[in-house]
Image (cartoon, helix red, strand yellow):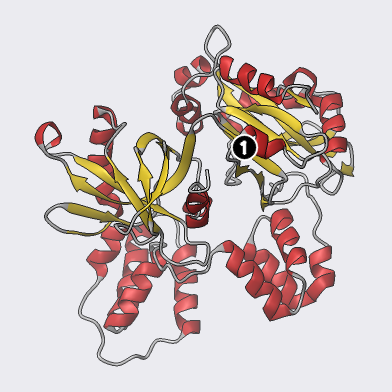
């Protein structure tokens, strides 16, 4: 049920509020369960009846709820603290349970029903993906290695994050958003099925390579995950590079230090371990080698830290030679001159860590090819939440990677800063709006 379909179901609002939460929940449950022949018509009938009984404010609420645009501030980090407060359990325990269960709702139900004991019962389960650990950006290589006794310095690849689970001959491959792609990455499943173990959970990256072994553009790797054309699947074989081992032959390794997990990784993954060194004599040489091979930069990791979902301070840091930010597209302006008729200049927003609306930090039309302009003009109206003569305002769902020379203070935008020489590098269909950089991340670049 898309936005335009739902808008078409809106009729005259009710004058008096009569709907209850329980009633609406039951009806939406019925809508979700409706399938098979005639299901589209039945879902429309159910929702039309619901909306006809809703007041104007209730219609607005339901429309935004159903299209994922409610934006009431319930970011995952906020919800984790809310669950901890409501059930009187430690926040770290809730955070770990979310990582292992894969979902906030499952964790909240367990905490409400069984408290700390129920949350401690969550274990790594083969075939159920674990929320991934993420890296924070570093201002420089020197800043990243400073304070880490014997850092692990690994290549930073421009690929797609994967997590692979194997239990005997059964193998599952997941993306960073925990979406299963096993049937579209069969060569990865076959490779892991042949590793010297009976059960394993591996974290890593995968990418398509050219004939001479250099990485293909990121978009070509991602095309594999969305492609249904067998010819394209065969043409773009994926090469995995694993950098962590979370389970091996019956032993869960999440709480073990990275140093130990890395030893297990080398035993089981062999030549498929990502290039890197422990306490290299010259970290800059590893960075140069990665760049020469066509990759993005390096990761600097603390070898004494456990595996924990999300960004965990300085445990993992990413170093790139040029500044990049993942931001969300808030709007696009109609172009002028040669770009007349195309949606062009993008309004860019950073994530509010407190759960509010994204905070605008700049605009750019640089880096947009004719192909991207045409795609934006076709696709952006499907995300429209308002427009005027010059601008189409979008639901904040599209993540775009932006290259920039830095940031500067500015009163022009709400965040008090502006991007310098921003340019579009690529869209990131593998990332969610909750993955974009925060306004604090952007402000921290002022110090650099």
Q: Which residue is mark 1?
A: 318
In the picture provided, is 142 more to the left or to the right than 213? right
- The image shows residue 67 at horizontal and vertical percentages of 38, 62
In the picture provided, is 234 more to the left or to the right than 151? left
Q: Is residue 378 above or below residue 295?
A: below
Image quarter of the N terminus: bottom left
- The image shows residue 345 at horizontal and vertical percentages of 24, 43
Q: Is residue 272 above or below residue 81?
A: above
- The image shows residue 125 at horizontal and vertical percentages of 78, 49
In the picture provided, is 70 more to the left or to the right than 171? left
In the picture provided, is 262 more to the left or to the right than 131? right
Q: Which image quarter: residue 102?
A: bottom right
Residue name at image x 56 percent, y 31 percent = 320
Q: Which image quarter: residue 147?
A: top right
Which residue is at the far top? 212
Which of these two is toward me, 96 or 361?
A: 361
Q: Is residue 93 above or below residue 444?
A: below
- The image shows residue 222 at horizontal and vertical percentages of 48, 31
């Amino acid at each position: 049920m898309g936005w335009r379909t739902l808008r078409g179901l809106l009729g005259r609002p009710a004058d008096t509020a009569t709907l209850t939460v329980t009633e609406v929940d039951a009806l939406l449950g019925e809508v979700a369960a409706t399938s098979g022949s005639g299901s589209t018509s039945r879902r429309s009938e159910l929702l039309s009846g619901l909306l006809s009984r809703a007041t104007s404010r209730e219609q607005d609420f339901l429309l935004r709820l159903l299209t994922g645009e409610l934006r009431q501030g319930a970011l995952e980090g906020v919800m984790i603290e809310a669950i901890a407060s409501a059930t009187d359990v430690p926040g770290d325990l809730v955070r770990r349970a979310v990582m292992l269960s894969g979902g906030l709702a499952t964790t909240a139900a367990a905490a409400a029903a069984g408290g700390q004991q129920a949350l401690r019962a969550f274990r790594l389960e083969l075939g159920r993906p674990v929320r991934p650990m993420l890296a924070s950006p570093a201002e420089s290589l020197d800043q990243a290695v400073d304070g880490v006794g014997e850092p692990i310095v690994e290549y930073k690849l421009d690929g797609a994050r994967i997590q692979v689970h194997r239990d005997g001959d059964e193998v599952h491959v997941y993306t960073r958003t925990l979406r299963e792609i096993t049937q579209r990455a069969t060569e990865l499943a076959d490779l892991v099925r042949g590793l010297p173990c009976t059960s394993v959970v591996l974290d890593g990256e995968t990418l398509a390579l050219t004939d001479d072994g250099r990485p293909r553009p990121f978009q070509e790797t991602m095309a594999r995950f969305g492609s249904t054309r067998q010819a394209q699947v065969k043409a773009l074989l994926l090469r995995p590079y694993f950098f962590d081992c979370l389970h091996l032959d019956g032993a869960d390794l999440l709480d073990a230090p990275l140093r130990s997990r890395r030893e297990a990784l080398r035993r089981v993954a062999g030549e498929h371990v990502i290039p890197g060194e422990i306490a290299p004599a010259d970290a800059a040489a590893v960075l140069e080698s990665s760049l020469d091979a066509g990759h993005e930069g390096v990761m600097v990791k603390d070898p004494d830290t456990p595996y924990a979902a999300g960004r965990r301070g300085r445990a993992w840091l990413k170093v790139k030679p040029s500044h990049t930010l993942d931001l969300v597209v808030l709007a696009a302006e109609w172009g002028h001159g040669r770009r007349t008729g195309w949606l062009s200049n993008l309004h860019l927003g950073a994530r509010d860590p407190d759960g509010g609306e994204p905070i605008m930090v700049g605009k750019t039309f640089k880096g947009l090819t004719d192909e991207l302009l045409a795609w934006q003009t076709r696709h952006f109206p499907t995300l429209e939440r308002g427009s005027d003569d010059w601008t189409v305002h979008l639901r904040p769902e599209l993540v775009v990677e932006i290259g920039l020379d830095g940031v500067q203070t500015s009163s022009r935008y709400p965040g008090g800063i502006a991007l310098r020489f921003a340019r579009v590098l690529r869209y990131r269909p593998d990332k969610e709006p909750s993955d974009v950089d925060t306004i604090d991340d952007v402000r921290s670049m002022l110090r650099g």
